[in-house]
Image (tube, rainbow, N blue to C red):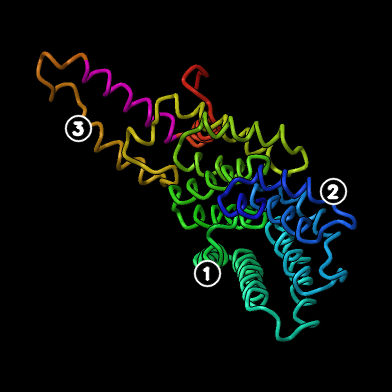
Amino acid sequence: AGRAALEKGDHSVALRHAGIAMHTSTPQCESAQFLNVEALLAAGKTSQAVNAARGLTYQGDNYAPEVLQLRARALYLSGNMQMAQKVFEEALRRDPECSPAIKHGLKRLRTQHNSKESGNQAFKGGRWQEAYDHYTRALEADPDLKSIFMVQVLCNRSATALKLGHAGEALEDAEKAIHWDERYSKGYLRRAGAKMAQEKFEEAIADYEKVKEMDSEIKGVDELLRNAKLELKKSKRIDYYKMLGLQQSASEADIKKAYRKAALKEHPDKAPAEERDEAEKKFKLVGEANAVLSDPEKRRQYDAGWTLEKKF
């Protein structure tokens, strides 16, 4: 009955049957132990499954290939890839002709681990596209796996997508990581980075503050939070660069040229009588923009977040 319930996806019933069988059998029924671990895994209770798998035996053997296979699977689903690989390798060593599932599991695990490591190395070397491709390969090896290992890979790919200028993809990976494990603080950190790139500063601030609450050990969050608050403040003031059609990296010559062009375009004398008042306001702002951006000290203060309330 327990096995049938598990096959139907009724994990709670399967667990109940396994528990009854384990407590009424003397010695404990091995098949009930197996069912218990499988039901725990199916229910997403991977930590409990790993603990239960330590006591598994098959025909009295704690290291039988059947035991090692399920133990490795529990470790794999919990995200402990290093230990899972060791157990898979031990199963293969004890029985070179073991089931295809063990060989497939080991091959898949190696692909995931190696792809993640290769991605990390490429990222450190600034090879963003290469890193992105490696992380994608790790994720595609088992698309249904939602372990902490895969959550980490998602966060890594999110950071890489942002480096490539793909804020939408970065946000998508971060959202998925949070959905899979809402306790993993770096998911919120990556989502905040994507929100910053999309100029959704208030949402980014909320995520950075959540990261601080969840994990005070993550370095650099205070600075990121300060920067997000500064960008929010700057977003609510008049954008002098935008008014002159400039990027923040504009040179002094660029500013002079842009000012002359904007002043001619927005001069009140060119506006119809009914639009004169609005034109004068725009013309005045163009003058303010030039006055600030053409003065090195005022421009530095403006770039640092000063607003019109601070008298230049």
SS class, disc 3? helix
| Residue on which disc 2 sits | 24
Mark 2 or mark 1: name the one nearer the start of the chain. 2
In percent of width and height, residue 13 lies at 66, 43
| Residue on which disc 3 sits | 265
Q: Nearer the viewer, residue 133 or 3?
A: 3
In percent of width and height, residue 260 lies at 26, 37
SS class, disc 1? helix
Residue 292 occupies quadrant: top left
Q: What residue type is disc 3 on?
A: Lys
The residue at 88%/69% (across/down) is 60
- The outermost residue toward the left is 272
Q: Is residue 71 left or right of residue 247?
A: right
Q: Given this view, does label 2 or label 3 mark the residue nearer the observer?
A: 2
Range covered by the magenta-colored residues: 278-294
- The outermost residue toward the bottom is 96
Q: Given this view, does label 3 or label 1 mark the residue nearer the observer?
A: 1
Q: What residue type is disc 1 on?
A: Glu
Marks 2 and 3, how far apart at CA: 89 Å
Mark 2 or mark 3: name the one nearer the start of the chain. 2
